[in-house]
Image (spheres, rainbow, N blue to C red):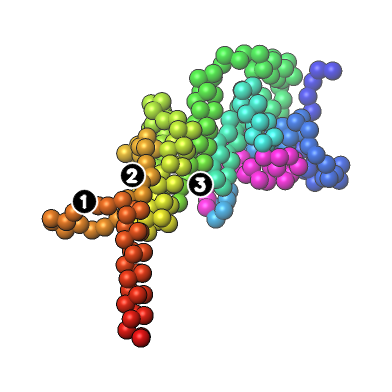
């Protein structure tokens, strides 16, 4: 049956809508349409004031998971599906997710406006064109998806890196590499694991208080490409004319021998 209905947001307060259930994809999409702003406005999120455009909203992955009773993976797949069908654009950070319905006017008249006689036909045609024309805004949507992947891979790196300073310049550097196709997140994580093993070996085995590189230095110098070979050579401060640094095993053997000599000297003194 052709046509449309005007659905008020207050339906979300109805007992039928509030039934405890797992949302279908259709219900989740309708939920998004009812949550986005019908006009530009300002909202507070985590203590900060945000300007939200018409057809957009600020939510969080966690809230979507709890409200729809979905897993994080299912929410992410659903949003990506909407993006691929040119229905939605979104951008996630660690604390919030920006959702923006594409061609919002297809679904919502300006508040107070009366539908013209041909509105039903124009809406149907607009929706059909919006659904079928997969080439429209292709580059823009591709950029949005690519941007999400870039930021998501950076958050993975930032989450495991021990030293937390200069996040903004680090993200900017990561985005620069990403845009130039000069970074592979899997290679970065593999390189970081080599670096982490190196630092932990320095501290725990060689007893040298090796400081962590700042994350910006790690990225600027592309240190994930370094080998970070682990060595058993002991750390000593050398003076001019000192002999070369000896192997770790040699140093330990000498220290053990010296300890045995001291014990023997103490025994002789006692008797």
Residue 65 colored in magenta in the image: yes
Specify start and end residues of the magenta stretch as a single range: 48-72
Residue 228's disc number:
none
Q: Earlier in the sequence, mark 2 or mark 1?
A: 2
Query: Viewer-nearest of labels 1 and 3?
Result: 1
* Residue topped by disc 1: 244
- Of residues 147 and 90, the one drawn nearer to the viewer in this rendering: 147
In the figure, is residue 268 to the left or right of 116? left
Residue 6 in percent (x, y) is at: 77, 31
Total numbered circles? 3
User: From mark 2 to mark 1, how far is it between C-alphas?
Assistant: 30 Å
Does residue 104 show up?
A: no
Residue 187: say if magenta: no
Q: Residues within 10 Å of mark 2 (few under 14, many from 20)?
A: few
Question: Crowdedness of circle 1 by 10 Å Cα count: few (<14), some, many (20+)?
Answer: few
Residue 36 position within the rendered picture, expressed as x and y whole percent measured from the top left = 65, 38
């Amino acid at each position: 049956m052709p046509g449309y209905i005007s659905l008020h947001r207050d339906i979300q307060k109805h007992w039928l809508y509030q039934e405890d259930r797992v949302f279908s994809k259709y219900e989740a999409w309708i939920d998004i349409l009812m949550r986005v702003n019908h006009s530009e406005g300002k909202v507070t999120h985590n203590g900060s004031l945000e300007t939200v455009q018409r057809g957009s909203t600020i939510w969080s992955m966690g809230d979507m998971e709890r409200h729809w009773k979905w897993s994080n993976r299912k929410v992410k797949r659903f949003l990506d599906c909407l993006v691929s069908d040119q229905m939605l654009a979104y951008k996630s950070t660690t604390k919030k997710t920006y959702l923006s319905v594409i061609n919002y006017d297809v679904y919502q008249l300006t508040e107070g406006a009366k539908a013209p006689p041909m509105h039903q036909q124009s809406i149907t045609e607009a929706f059909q064109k919006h659904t079928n024309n997969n080439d429209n805004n292709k580059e823009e949507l591709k950029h949005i998806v690519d941007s999400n992947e870039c930021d998501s891979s950076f958050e993975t790196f930032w989450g495991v890196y021990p030293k937390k300073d200069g996040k903004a310049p680090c993200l900017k550097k990561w985005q620069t590499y990403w845009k130039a196709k000069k970074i592979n997140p899997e290679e970065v994580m593999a390189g970081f694991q080599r670096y982490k093993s190196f630092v932990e070996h320095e501290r725990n085995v060689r007893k040298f208080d090796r400081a962590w590189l700042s994350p910006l230095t790690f990225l600027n110098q592309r240190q994930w490409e370094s080998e970070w070979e682990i060595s058993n050579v002991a750390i000593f401060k050398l003076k001019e004319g000192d002999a070369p640094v000896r192997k770790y095993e040699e140093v330990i053997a000498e220290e053990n021998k010296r300890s045995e000599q001291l014990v023997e000297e103490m025994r002789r003194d006692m008797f």
